Image (cartoon, rainbow, N blue to C red):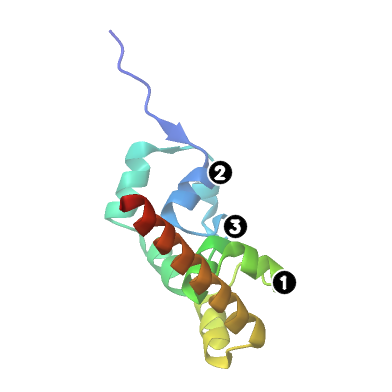
Amino acid sequence: MSGAAPQTMKPETAAKKLGIFLPATPEEFRSGPVTREELNALQNDPPQWLVDLRLHGPHPRQEVARKLGVSTSGLVRAGMSRAMTTAEIQELLAAKPEWLLAERAIQAEVRAENARLKARTND
């Protein structure tokens, strides 16, 4: 009786689960499928390249949006839909450009409305 084949995923899926920008990963990560066990190992005991990538970037669009407190759509509207490093994100947070303030306000309104709707459905 043979054992079950390990569950694998594309590198793109593994990078998304790890919250990292795939083109910035080492070639060996990008070159083939990632098993569930390998993904768990990367999450539980990340190698130095993964630690550095999470700390300094470049970060994928979803992570950039989260760190800036805006939606990914807001990034696109502002023309900022590229991967960014942690330093670039910190510069934007310090500079507080008009688009960032506007998108953060929109995001706050969306969150407030979602909370209102959730409270209404829980009544």
Kindly indicate whether the residue at mark 3 contacts the one at mark 2 (C-beta within 8 angstroms): no
Query: For the N terminus, which image quadrant?
Result: top left
Which numbered marker is on residue 79? 1
Q: CA distance from mark 1 to mark 2?
A: 30 Å
Residue 51 is situated, as x and y percent measured from the top left of the image, at: 38, 66
In percent of the image, x 54 and y 47: which residue is there?
A: 30
At numbered mark 3, what does the secondary structure look like: helix, strand or loop?
A: helix
Q: Residues within 10 Å of mark 2 (few under 14, many from 20)?
A: few
Residue 39 is situated, as x and y percent measured from the top left of the image, at: 37, 45
Q: Is residue 72 above or below residue 22?
A: below
Please report whichever mark, 2 or 3, sits nearer to the chain's N-terminal start.
3
Please report whichever mark, 1 or 2, sits nearer to the chain's N-terminal start.
2
Which residue corresponds to mark 2?
31
Give the amino acid at mark 1.
Gly
Residue 79 is situated, as x and y percent measured from the top left of the image, at: 72, 71
In front of the other: 32 or 36 = 36
In percent of the image, x 63 and y 69: which residue is there?
A: 74
Q: Quadrant of residue 91?
A: bottom right
